[in-house]
Amino acid sequence: MEEDLFQLPVKIGDVTLRNPFIVGSGPTVKSIEQLEQIEKCGWGAASTKQTFNPRPYINYDPRYRWFKKEKLHIFTAERRLDMESGLRLIEAARKRCRELVIIANFSDNSVNMEGWEEGARRFEAAGAQILELNFCCPNMSFNVDVSDKGVNAPRPSSGASMGQDENAVAHVVQSLRKAIRIPIIAKLTPEGGRIAEVSKAALEAGASAVSGVANRLGIPPVDIWNYRKPIYNLQGENTVGCMSGPWIKPLSMRDVFEIRKLVGPGPHINGTGGISSMEDAVQMMMCGADSIGVCTETMLRGFGFLEKWMKSLKAYMKEMGFSTAREMRDLLISEIKSAADLTLWSGYAQVDKEKCSGCGLCVEIGHCNAIVMTDVVASIDPKLCKGCSTCIDICPKQSIRMVEEDVAKR
Ligand SMILES: Cc1cc2nc3c(=O)[nH]c(=O)nc-3n(C[C@H](O)[C@H](O)[C@H](O)COP(=O)(O)O)c2cc1C
Ligand code: SF4
Ligand code: SF4
């Protein structure tokens, strides 16, 4: 029998996803048509666009920019679902999507727990298979905190401002764990630098999984000649924006790595942030992720690329002798050493004179006095070379290589 390309099961609580790939909550999971397309393209799960209850005070038509060179996506304005539309979407998805696991991304803004509990119960009744609590959105109170602190009246804490407080997160998770039966994911912000500690608190309070990371707040590039005009189209003012996409990947891998180290091998971690290829996904798993969330890439390219990812993932797994996603997980956890424990080998850089064009770029390197121009080509003094690699990376002709001496320097 022919193997199903999209089968590579993982579990969140007692729910099985056909594969680890989840379309992350955002603008590509707002309608039943999108969810049907996601199912058709073979994804394991989709986390629907955030339902915010009551209707949030920041809820505008979208304003996005994609900076191709920086591989940075940034948004300032976004529209959430209100409670009724969120529930209708889940109901429709459960009727029309047979294999796609439907996750409801939800947050409530009430001070006591009644709103959270009622919302959670209603999503469970509507058919959500997993509830993802949004402790990550930086576009609500956290945006106001960062850009306006002390000017406007304080707002109720939600999303990324709430998600930095492990007591607040644990309190919500604990209450909802008693209110519903379906698995709960706590989706956490990287802001505040304590995502591992907050994850631990959420898991101890009863979450089946944690998901990290969501967007970070930042100031986008500014036109210095016209700095009052924002780089966004159809927008009057500059503001801090929510950043995502490939630039964030090294940071999100570090966050997942730290979470895994702190919570141990048991809990499910959904690794999200900057994933744009099969190789990115494998790296994220190696840092500790069980499943992979993808948002920005689906905004830019739709959902069909998963087929290519699954084909290359299966080929990679076959070649490497892996038969489950779990076997790829955590492989980097013991490999990543502290800078204090590194072994450095002796060696020096050497120029291939046949390939060198004499452009002189390497001679300009500010921290190196080993390179000089002799005749019309560069030459490196092995005694002065410290082996840092900068010249290799800046040479436009790839004419420099490292010569390794088989001697440990330290
Ligand atoms: C325009 C936009 C809207 C988003 N909306 C939500 C949301 O409603 N709920 C949520 O939990 N995350 C939301 N996210 C965060 C993404 O799900 C994801 O965590 C983040 O963008 C990092 O992953 P990526 O680099 O693959 O986009 C949104 C991201 C973007 C870019
Ligand atoms: S490897 Fe570093 S130290 Fe050595 S020549 Fe190149 S830039 Fe200079
Ligand atoms: S950067 Fe490369 S090509 Fe240019 S001088 Fe140095 S070695 Fe030669």
Image (cartoon, helix red, strand yellow):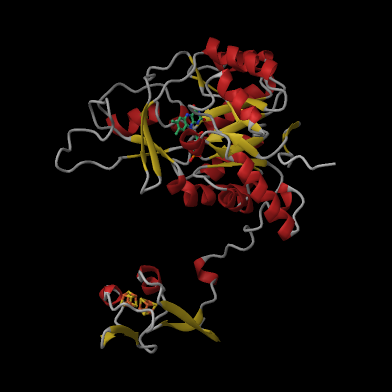
Tell me where residue 336 sits by quadrant. bottom right
Q: Residue at x 40, y 81 (%)?
A: 386
Q: Residue at x 26, y 35 (%)?
A: 231
Is 385 left or right of 34, judged from the image as shown?
Answer: left
Q: Nearer the viewer, residue 10 or 352?
A: 352
Q: Residue at x 36, y 49 (%)?
A: 69
Q: Position of residue 238 (x, y in %)?
A: 25, 32
Residue 225 higher or lower than 38, as above or below: below
Tell me where residue 331 sits by quadrant. bottom right
Q: Position of residue 354 (x, y in %)?
A: 38, 83
Image quadrant of ligand 3 equals bottom left
Can the viewer see residue 311? yes
Tell me where residue 160 sits by quadrant. top left
Q: Position of residue 355 (x, y in %)?
A: 38, 79
Is 167 left or right of 152, judged from the image as shown?
Answer: right
Going by the picture, which residue comes out furthest to the top?
84
Going by the picture, which residue comes out furthest to the right?
1
Q: Position of residue 115 (x, y in %)?
A: 55, 14
Can the viewer see residue 149? no
